[in-house]
Amino acid sequence: IPLKKIGGISPNDSFMSSASGICIYSKKKNENGESGELCRFNLKTLSGDDRDEVIEFMNTVKRWNEKRSIQANEDETDEDDDVQQKVGLGQTALKMKHFAEREIELSKQKRDRESRKARYLKDSGGLKYTA
């Protein structure tokens, strides 16, 4: 999970499990105004105090990344989400554009190869001594 997507980290206590759980929530809110859950995992070998230390460490890393991105003037927008939102006709159009550009590129390469071959044939009188 990229650090720029993390909105919050909190403990997750399940009465059914003896393990210490941690939930990671996204920055983006859904239509209900709630943060979406990115990840949930259990730390089976740690006690509740150890889990709190892990959460504090993860929050420290998150805050460090936020400060670093502000100092580096990084944009907070998420390009991956923009690409994922282009579905249906938008993706089909992007694919068609890509393949059209690729077809033009391949035809140009073919013309270049044929022109080189024509020069070699003209200068040498044929492909007489080629392997």
Image (tube, rainbow, N blue to C red):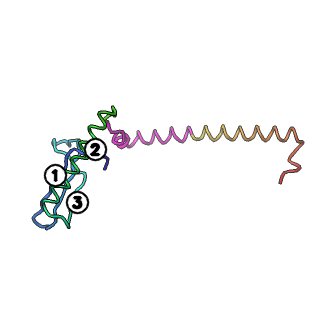
Q: Are marks 3 and 1 in contact (CB under 8 Å)?
A: no
Give the structural element (helix, strand or loop) at label 1. strand
Q: Are marks 2 and 1 in contact (CB under 8 Å)?
A: no
Q: Which residue is mark 3?
A: 41
Asked if the stretch drawn in magenta spans residue 99, the answer is: yes
- Segment tinted magenta in the rendering: 77-101
Give the structural element (helix, strand or loop) at label 2. helix
For image coordinates 9% across by 64% down, the residue present is: 15
Q: Which residue is mark 2?
A: 5
* Circle nearer the N terminus (2, 1): 2
- Where is residue 17 shown, x and y percent of the image? 14, 67
Q: Amino acid at mark 2?
A: Lys
Real-space Cα distance between discs 2 and 1?
15 Å
Examine the rendered structure and indicate whether residue 57 appears above or below residue 118: below
Q: The C terminus is located in which quarter?
A: bottom right
Real-space Cα distance between discs 3 and 2?
17 Å
Using a 10 Å C-alpha cutoff, classify the residue at mark 3 as few (fewer than 14 neighbours), some (14 to 19) or many (20 or more).
Answer: few
106 lies left or right of 117: left
For image coordinates 16% across by 51% down, the residue present is: 10
Q: Which residue is mark 1?
A: 10
* Circle nearer the N terminus (3, 1): 1
* Circle nearer the N terminus (3, 2): 2
Give the structural element (helix, strand or loop) at label 3. strand
